[in-house]
Structure formats: structure tokens, C-alpha cells
Image (cartoon, helix red, strand yellow):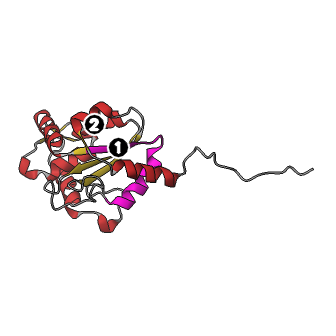
Amino acid sequence: MVPVTFPERRSADVPTDEERVDEALRLLTGPPVALDVAVKRLARGGGVYAWWAPPSVLPDLPGPPNDTDPSRRMLYLGRATSLRGRILRNHLRRSGSSTLRRTLAGLLVSEGFRTTWTDRVVLIPEDEKRLTAWMHEHLRLTWAEDAEPTVIEAELVRRLHPPLNVHGVDPEHIKAAVVAAKNSYNASSGPEQP
């Protein structure tokens, strides 16, 4: 007797990757939240997040407008295994572990952010605080929880082309000013020479 096999069926309550991307996109383009409010609401689980700013902030790097608040433009999209941890411990605290912070410091040359060398280039403690204050004043946040954010992040970046993202963005959408700012920041300090 030959065993009968049936094609694998997906449970109706398990969303497809496309459905997950669509839901994340809906949440990410919802109303951006002030950072002091966002940090109280962020989940400890994984997901994707987007940083938003008015067009007057980094005007040479326009991003896609927010669906519910057209006065905001997306600057950066990221993923995290812990949304709360990534935003609080990295993006709002340490330039050494946040590509967003390093890029912002490089772009905000007129603000005079100063760096030093530890095992990498980092902002001096006073300027870490100053950048965090600047972020609270100028940026807003949206997020979408997802247990496997890596799966959906690449598609979201591909669709949205946030101007501060470099990885995963089609080469034609990579902004030269962002690459130059990253390089400038990385060259601003180095290990002590003997």
C-alpha cells in the first residue's frame, strides 16, 4: 500500500511573510510617537521600527512621508530582537552600537559633535547626551512587533528607501551624503599611534 500524502497546509491563523510585511507597513506608517511616550510603550519582543522627522530636519535627505502625519518623513528603518532594548540602550544612549546615532552625528556637522576612540569611534559622553536630547526634540518613532523581524525588514527597506539606510537599499537610492557622513564620523578618531 502506498501512503497518501497531502500538500502541506498553512494554518489559517499563521500570517504569510507578505501579510506580515503589510501589517508592519501599516503600523510603521501610523502616527509617529514622541520618544518620551514611545519608550514607555515599546515591547520587549522583536520587531521593526522607523524614525521620523519633519522635512526641515536633514532637508537634503527626503524620505517617504508618513501616511497619517504628512508633516513627517521617514529617515531610518531598523529591526531588533528586543524593540525596547534596541531603542533605549542603543539608539538613545550609545553611538558605539548604533549606526543611526553615528550617521546622525556625521550629518550634523554644524552641531560640532566630538568623538573619541575606545575600541571604535564613539561620541564623548557629553555629546552622547546632547545627541539624545537632539533626537528627543526632532525625531518621532513608530514600530511593529514581529517575532522574526529579519524576514520582513529587508522587504520594508526595499519598498520604502529610508534615506539613512544603506544596507539593503537599491544602489540608486543610496544617498552619497549619508555614505560621506558615515565615513567622516568613522575617520574622526582613531587608535593612539605609538
Q: Position of residue 68 (x, y in %)?
A: 29, 52
Name which residue lies at 34% across and 56% down: 167
Name which residue lies at 24% across and 63% down: 175
The local crowd at label 1, few if under 14, some if 14 to 19, many if 20 or more residues have their Cα within 10 Å, is many
Q: Which residues are magenta?
A: 141-161
Name which residue lies at 17% across and 57% down: 55
Which element type, helix, strand or loop, lies under badge 2? helix
> Are discs 2 and 1 less than 8 Å apart at CB?
yes
Residue identifier under label 2? 38
Quick check: is 144 in the magenta stretch? yes
Give the quadrant of residue 163.
bottom left
Q: Nearer the viewer, residue 86 or 37?
A: 37
Whether residue 116 is visible here, answered yes or no, is no
Q: Quadrant of the C terminus?
A: top left
Judge from the rendering whether residue 184 lies leftward or rightward of residue 2; answer left or right: left
> In the image as oriented, which residue stretches furthest toward the front?
68
Q: Position of residue 105 (x, y in %)?
A: 16, 47
Is residue 89 depicted above or below 1 in this figure? Answer: above
Which element type, helix, strand or loop, lies under badge 1? strand
**Residue type beneath disc 2:** Ala
Please state the total of marks drawn on the protein image. 2
- Pointer 2 or 1: first along the chain: 2
Q: Which mark is residue 143?
A: 1
Quick check: is 35 in the magenta stretch? no
Judge from the rendering whether residue 173 lies leftward or rightward of residue 153; answer left or right: left
Q: Nearer the viewer, residue 194 or 67?
A: 67
**Residue type beneath disc 1:** Trp
Task: Kindly report the distance in space between the C-alpha atoms of the residues bearing marks 2 and 1.
Answer: 9 Å
Q: Nearer the viewer, residue 112 or 134?
A: 134
Name which residue lies at 14% across and 35% down: 129
